[in-house]
Every structure is written in C-alpha cells, then in structure tokens.
Image (cartoon, rainbow, N blue to C red):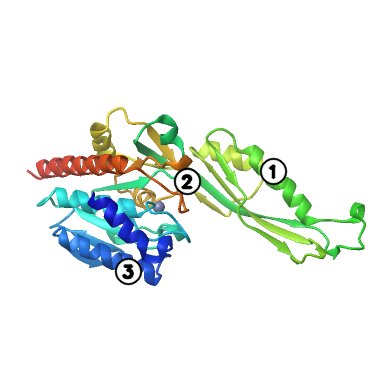
Amino acid sequence: MRALTRLDQLYAIGAGTRLGYSPEEDAAHELAARWLQQAGLDVTTDEAGNLFGHRGDARIWSGSHLDTVPNGGRFDGALGVVAAIEAANRLPGTELGVVAFRAEETGPMGSRRLAELPDAFLEVHVEQGPALERLGEPLGIVTGVAAQARGEVTFEGRAAHAGTTPIEERADALVDAAKFVLHVRECAREGAFATVGALEVEPGATNVVPGRVTLSVDARASTAEALETLVEAIGFEPSWRQDPVAMSGPPLEALRAVLPGAPQLISGAGHDAMVLAAAGVPTAMLFVRSLNGGASHCPDELSSPEDIALAVDALTETLARLSASAVSDKR
Ligand SMILES: [Zn+2]
C-alpha cells in the first residue's frame, strides 16, 4: 500500500525525530510537496511554513502535521497528511485541499490563513490511547477535545547539609512535593487526567536537602465543569486554560454518515483540528486504532495496514460527500 510506503519514507527522515522547524521537518515537507504535486495539487506555503496543496478554490481541507517529538512514532501526524494525499489522489478533479502544519508538537498553532479558507476541515490521526483497541474497533469519531488547565506549584523548604542535618529538623521541599504528586494522581478520576510532568529541584545537588521545588500540573477533563472540579480538588492556580472544543457541522455529520455505529470519543490530546475548530471552522476528526496498548510518542507506536486502509476509505468518502453537498449548495 502506497500510504505505508510513504509513512516509512517519512519515518526514515531523522529516524523518528523531526522536530518543528528542524532540517528533518523541512525535508519531510519537501517530500510531501512532491507528493502533492504528483496528486495534481497546486502547492504553496504561508509565512509560518505550513504547506498547502489545493485544487481550484478549495474550501474543504484535510491534513495534519509532519513534525514529531524526539524519538517519536511512525504514525502521529504523518498518517493524517499521507491519508489526505491518498484521498486527493482518489478524488481527481474534486476541489479540495491538503495541509501539512508546522511544529504541532510544541503547541499546535494551526494556520490563520487556513482558518479563513475552509468551510470544512477533517483530520485523520492515530488515537494515541487504548480506547479503540479495548473496544475492538478500527476507527472512532472524535466529538470534541478535552478541556485543559496547566500551572506551576512551588514548594518552599530549607536547603541544608545532607550529612549533618537531623531528619526531624529538615524542611525538605521535595518530600512535600512528592506527597503532592501522589495527591494529584488521586484526584484524577474516571475520564479525567492529571499529571506532574516537570519538576525543578533547587539547589539540585546530591548532598543538599532540597530547599525549593517547582513542579508542573497538567489537568484535563471532558467538560469545563469537570475540569473546574478537578482543579479545585488538586488545589492549584492554572496559568493557562483551554475550554473544551467541540467538533461540529457538516464534517462531523458526513463522518457519522460514512461510519454509522463507529464509537465516538473525546480526545484528551490537542491537535491541529482543535485549533481550527476553536477558530470557528466546522471540523471533524477521525481516530485510527493505536495498537500496543495505545503507545504513542515512542517507536512502539503502531497502527495496522488494515485499519489505515479503512481510514483512507472513510476519509475519501467523507470528503467526496462534503464536496458533493458544497457543489449542490452552489447551484
Ligand atoms: Zn499528532
């Protein structure tokens, strides 16, 4: 299958490491630009380096990103671009566009220009979690992206000599921080997520009792209310919040018509589709089953050729439906 060959070709660039705006991401964009031209699309870029391929006055767009986290997988992002190019190949003469976004992994920015262009956006992406594998379903329809809050918490203690300060006299900031990390984990209940992912210990020396610890908190839940409850339970002050984003409109309706009975999921991860949906573009997202227990952002990331073929079929049919109804609207 050509899609798999292309995923291999992309993976070979940087062996799974294509950071945003790196030479490896550049090379991936150059390769994708050639594929877009071969599909008969006009190729342009914008000031942020996002790559566009389009036929005519395309108002219906699909795509994803080509950057990865360090030592990432074969499918995250790349699948959405490769699948969109496959769909464009199968729909010759249809006015549609394919986009490859830059630097999604460092915080998806989408593209202001694209938000002005499309009446519809569709992103195919690997689930990056275990839900579809557990359900035994190859594909899932994303109905929205979870609400999210991030912040930092600082613990003040007293730096002291590790060899002479009696244990009972210490004010060890890291011991307090460790209790808090366990508390954060306890607060995340069914459907909610809370993570301490970064921790800075000061002075950070093996022979000094930690005097100060700053840690990050990342909290996510399916609704704004559930997120508020979670933030209160954890007890931290978010410095950044993202409201939940709903998928909607003709792209979601078309995807549901193409995949009746497919499971519907909330995405806990942010995506390019989230940025476009938040900008008011009618947007839908199709998840492809992640195998290996949902492994992602690592070389174990895996989706089967059969599931990928089903995703390309579903994307193609959804784009064809959207295009047909756009043409009939014009008449
Ligand atoms: Zn991604």
Q: Residue visible at 86% across and 62% down?
A: 162
The residues bearing labels 1 and 2 have C-alpha atoms spaced at a distance of 23 Å
Q: Is residue 164 left or right of residue 28?
A: right
Residue beneath disc 3: 27
Residue 251, horizontal then vertical, whole percent: 26, 41
Badge 2 element: loop
| Distance CA(mark 3)–CA(mark 1) | 43 Å
Q: Secondary structure at mark 3?
A: helix
Residue position marked by numbered label 1 in the rendering? 182
Secondary structure at numbered mark 1: helix
Looking at the image, is 155 positioned above or below residue 313? below
Viewer-nearest of discs 1 and 2: 2
Quick one: label 2, few (<14), some, or many (20+) residues within 10 Å? some
Residue 49 in view (yes/no): no
Q: Along the polypeptide, which appears first: circle 3 or circle 2? A: 3
Asked if the residue under mark 1 is in contact with the one under mark 3, i.e. CB atoms within 8 Å, the reply is no
